[in-house]
Amino acid sequence: MAFPAVFLVLMRGMWKGVKAARPWLVSLIVAALVYLFIPGAWYVAAGAVSGLLAAWLMAGDA
């Protein structure tokens, strides 16, 4: 329970609205799909890269 509580507190401090959270959502979805369909720990890299790419592509929207 400690890890989710700390994560939620940190996330609350960084929250700037739904628009700014879209790269987090992209990262979550890509990491989950890679975890389900590709063996190994590639979901970590896929989530990070997809989140960075989404943030870069959506930079003008926020």
Image (tube, rainbow, N blue to C red):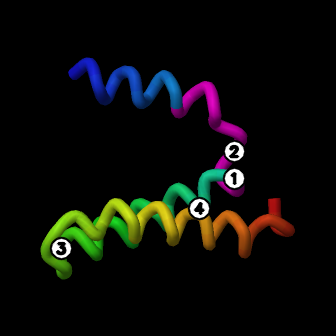
The residue at 81%/59% (across/down) is 62
The residue at 18%/73% (across/down) is 36
Provide residue 3's location: percent of width, then percent of height: 29, 26
Q: Which residue is mark 1?
A: 20
Asked whether, in this view, residue 10 is left or right of residue 8, the answer is: right
Separation (CA) of disc 2 from disc 3: 29 Å
Q: Label 1 is placed on what type of residue?
A: Ala
Mark 2 near mark 1, Cβ–Cβ under 8 Å?
A: yes
Separation (CA) of disc 3 from disc 1: 26 Å
Separation (CA) of disc 2 from disc 4: 12 Å
**Crowd rating for badge 4 (residues with CA inside 10 Å; few <14, some 14–19, many 20+):** many
Separation (CA) of disc 1 from disc 4: 7 Å
Q: Which residue is mark 3?
A: 36
- Describe the element under mark 3 as helix, strand or loop: helix
Separation (CA) of disc 4 from disc 3: 20 Å
- Describe the element under mark 4 as helix, strand or loop: helix
In the figure, residue 6 lies in which quadrant?
Answer: top left
Asked whether, in this view, residue 56 is left or right of residue 54, the answer is: right
Q: Which residue is mark 2?
A: 17
